[in-house]
Amino acid sequence: MSKKKTSKKARLYQLIIVVTIIALTSHAFSIRKIAADPLSNPILFTLVVPPIASSGSFGHQLETFGNHLTGMDAAPRGGDLCMMSTDGTIRFLTAEAGFGVGSGAIQGVDGIAVRQPSVHWNGSKALFSMVIGGPTQAFDQSYRSNRWQIYEITNLTEVVSGMAPIIQKIANQPAYNNVSPIYGSDGQIIFTSDVPLFGMEHTYPQFDEYESSQTNTGIFKLNPSTGKVVHLTHSPSGDFDIHLAKDGRVISTRWEHLKRDQQASNHRAGNTQWQPVNYESEAPNAAIVNASAIIDGKPYADADGTPYEIFPEAFVHIENGINVEPNRDTNEPLHDFNEFLPWEITENGERHQTMNHVGRHEFGGVYQEGSKIDDPNLVFGLGNYSSNAYRETVGSDAGIFQIKEDPRPGKEGTFYGTWSREFKRFASGRIFEFSLPIGANPQDMEVVDWSSPDIDNVANAGKGHFRNPIMTMDGVMLVSHATEDALFDQSHPYTFRICKMVKNTADASDTEHIPGSYLTGAGLTKDIVYWGDSSDPITVTVQLSEVGIAEIVTKDAPVALPTYEVDPIEKSVLDEEAIDLEELRAWMIENNLAIIAIRNATERDQGESQQPFNLRVPGGVESIPSSGKVYDISHFQIFQADLIRGYGLRNYDGRRPIATPIHDTDQSPVIEKFNLLDPQAPEGSVKIGLDGSIAAFVPATRALSWQTLAPDGEEVVRERQWLTFSPGEIRTCEGCHGINNKTHLGNDKPINKPEALRDLVKAWKSKMDGTTLGLLSSALGNEITIEKIFPNPFSNETLIRFSLKESQLINVSIYNIQGKLVRELSNDVLKHGEHTLIWKGENDLGGRCTSGIYMCKLSTENGVHTSKIVLK
């Protein structure tokens, strides 16, 4: 057999690998060949150090929430970003690129933790998050100010072929904790972060609604070239595990904890010393509220002058013999809410909802009593309309994490995720498969449990726990598995290793899978040395967890969802009132507003019977499917998540969101002027139309919730989640809080034209009093044809297209709303034919213009044409 000559390129790769092996002797590992099942494609994964500085796991980067923290307890330094080749070879990419320190070296200034790699669909590059720097001496806490930042392997294709990785920090990202990064379809980067809402640094960090622990503030989008950051969702308790589906939906796990402040209740009962306070506003210099205990004959504030919350229902009532929430309605059961559901949003921040409007009635987990004690129509339970056979096998305080779509052709809309309980499980548990393509009814969603329901038990008889499921292109599911079956503490460590899931039995009807052999064999250990609260460094030998699996393979690019779609029914109302939709949106964007439009609030989804469904508008429409108590609804009260709750005695920096009736803010300054708020009703309330419709301008980029009210102000039906609207968005809800299939009356979704929307836009038009901009144009003759500027509104760049019948001098310039020249795009003689000019939202100095309305003026010797452009 003849021996083939080795190419120069192959010899170069061999040399690089040899040099890399030598260089890595000072790190934890050199390149390793593991006796493993072969892979069809290489994978990226991260090595994560288990908790070492604490006996608990709260806040650890693998846990369910609060996992963006940077202390040695939450993000122990000593991890790596790794690649496993198809033959089982492991390379330690961050170490190759010069990041991190090796086994036995102190995890100090160069120590790293890594997380959540994401591969671009063309396989040429990958994102991940990394925090650099640990304690440098005993008792050092200064390193905690180091942030998780997004990094990119820019030459992943070459790395797969043997080249050394090039790892660079993403430019222009916020100087906060940025995690779970993914590529958007337009080249921008989408991620979660704890960036303070609207840049209000004095509110940092934001506290969640459960433990008042630090959490992220939602989902963001970064244009690395311009540095523009857009806040897509405001999350009061955090968004996690972002994924971009093939159909353009950004999927996340969102933690919903819409409830009153339990720290305030505990403080009032004498259990803790949180000393909750309300600030008068979100302003940096806002004073602390010291309110009267009784206002209008009703309990208003506690003994410290801190107002009681008014939304949602009371969390507790009597504690330690103390009435901690005396404003409780005794006809309502106590409300404690906790769930992790899959949510979706477009890449522009629109259509924010649970995936396909799926909820606890379909997934299970959170069970509630009827919201009115004296109404036997309202039941405990989840109804009988879901096709999910597993929803009764899952526990509360739980939900689905690490959701990823099946990448194979023909499997669009099929997703895999981890169903995990809240604490001490590292977001691990059972592996669920579910199908929710756009338009699918969530009631028809069937869940396949790839594991065993027994895993959800406190101790699961040796089945262990799974996380990070991904389906590979060849139809093999890879997961990270821990053998530990008890809740975590230092005597029950969780160590995750990557394996393929294999069938438990040969029975085709048996969907249970168990872990196959671990791809890394016995796993990877490391000596972690770090400075703690002792005079000498601490050394701990740990087995590293292998998590965050991402297949390196070429996939079809996702398709971006269209923007600013308005439902045809609502659009017809605007047309009938001669409302220029583009102009209305531009005004809303300028004032950071959106519109919510509900067609018939008396119609409710047939699957939800925990809240009233016998509803009527006095003198108007009614939906009364059952005998028994009937509820009149006359008003709709809207709440915004205001960051006004602080904690005094603990001297905490940061704020917790509190549900506050909508009102003017610096970011949305015309809420009160342009809404049809009823001064005779509770604050933040608009009337419900006789047709059951509701419409209101609402703050954009801020979490919102709402409830319907009886004429006497009694709360009737409450929203159970927080939602975010995008500036300029007009959001339609057919019925009260959404309808999946049929209403309680067996009706389809309402299709009436919402008269409340008509009233709202007519009032808007009147209040604008002729100050709307309109489209200005003077005759240019037929020597020039001007096309519609697109996209408009825009965030990155917009195209200005026109065609000339003959050569002539053309000036195209951008002006702001005050008429000041911003940028000149053209002032030259242009030849006949088609022309395209690009405006990237920059001024003549190259700086980024602020969001708002601009005018594009095209001038010729025969006239001027002016068009409006909206920069988001």
Image: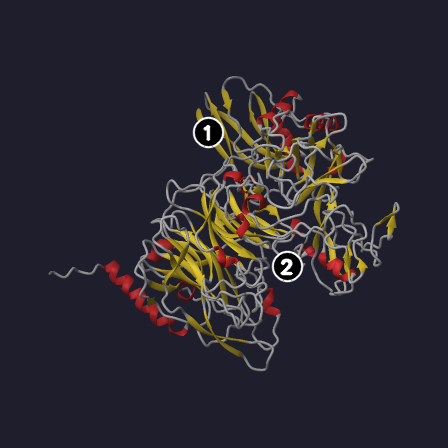
Labels in figure, total:
2
Q: Which residue is mark 2?
A: 214
Mark 1 residue element: strand
Mark 2 residue element: loop
Which quadrant would residue 6 be assigned to in this image? bottom left
Residue 276 appears at what percent x and percent y? 76, 59
Q: Work out which quarter of the rendered image holds the C terminus and state it.
A: top right
Q: Which residue is mark 1?
A: 835
Residue 388 appears at what percent x and percent y? 51, 44
Residue type of the residue flagged with mark 2: Gln
Residue at image x 79%, y 60%?
Answer: 268
On screen, 413 above or below 51? above
Q: Earlier in the sequence, mark 1 or mark 2?
A: 2
Q: Work out which quarter of the rendered image holds the N terminus and state it.
A: bottom left
In this rendering, does residue 327 appear at all? yes
Instruction: Please indicate whether residue 583 sits to the left or right of residue 29 in the image.
Output: right
Q: Tell me the crowding category of disc 2: few under 14, some 14 to 19, or many 20 or more residues within 10 angstroms, Cα based.
A: many
Residue lying furthest top: 782
On screen, 253 above or below 794? below
Residue 2 appears at what percent x and percent y? 11, 60
Residue at image x 72%, y 55%?
Answer: 261
Closer to viewer: mark 1 or mark 2: 2
Give the alpha-carbon distance from disc 1 to disc 2, as whole Å: 52 Å
